[in-house]
Amino acid sequence: MLGVAMVLPLVITWVYFVLLSGSHPALQRGVAIVGKSVQFALPVVWVGLICRERLGWIAATWRGVSGGFGFGLLVFVTMIVGWHQVLEPRGELQAAADEIRTKVIELGVDSLVGYLALGIFYSLVHSLLEEYYWRWYVFGRLRRYVSVNWAILLSSIAFASHHVILLTTYFGWFSPWTWFFSVSVAVGGAFWAWLYQRSGSLYGPWISHLLIDAAIFLIGFQMMGDFLM
């Protein structure tokens, strides 16, 4: 089941983001919602109902929040400054911007309100769900079978894998940006796993993840220019 959990997000992303590309927006959204619902329900069902273990994440403390906030803020500022000072002036991501606009339309987000709602949901809610899934369940279970360092490595690679599908859609398989951003995601996942191991709490990784997702949506909004206005 742990192996399924590590591969399932990649499969779901490939289905609704690649296989169903060009399909009706309602179909893509429906498959994404059903797939992610199954994904995020899996750990609770398996641990709580099948294995009958206590869901320890409910009792998480606020330890590690300052470290998570500091890391998230550092990455947030680096991303915003890098976009404004390097990437945007040089037009490095212009081709990706066109693909992002196309994908946003395919997923039925065609207004400023819709984009803001999506950004708020992903930053606040989806980031927490991903931390519960990848750090509490995948990393937490991996620790039972391998060393902590190996658990950090394997869980962060699995976490980055479904992001590779997203990034290749925008940049292509042979773009250096695809692999730079993919490695960056893996590094972030490794830090969050380390922070979770150190603090025993999901709140620090969640706040850090929240800030970085907010930066992504802010840059995405600026990349799309007047499209949503």
Image (spheres, rainbow, N blue to C red):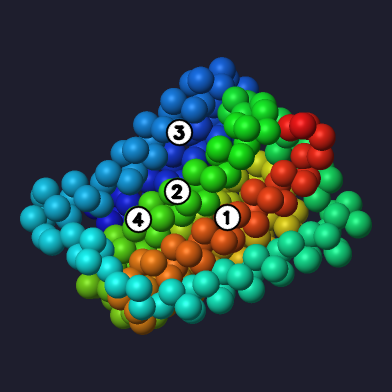
Q: Quadrant of residue 151?
A: bottom left
Q: Is residue 186 visible?
A: no
Q: Are marks 1 and 3 in contact (CB under 8 Å)?
A: no
Q: Are marks 3 and 4 in contact (CB under 8 Å)?
A: no
Distance Cα–Cα, label 3 vs label 4: 16 Å
Instruction: List the residue tagged with mark 3.
Output: 32
Instruction: List the residue tagged with mark 2.
Output: 126
Distance Cα–Cα, label 1 vs label 3: 18 Å
Q: Is residue 67 visible?
A: yes
Badge 2 or badge 1: first in the primary sequence: 2
Please determine whether, in this image, residue 26 is positioned above or below residue 88. Answer: above
Image quadrant holding the C terminus, namely: top right
Distance Cα–Cα, label 2 vs label 4: 10 Å
Q: Residue at x 14, y 53 (%)?
A: 48
Badge 2 or badge 4: first in the primary sequence: 2
Distance Cα–Cα, label 2 vs label 1: 9 Å
Instruction: List the residue tagged with mark 4.
Output: 133
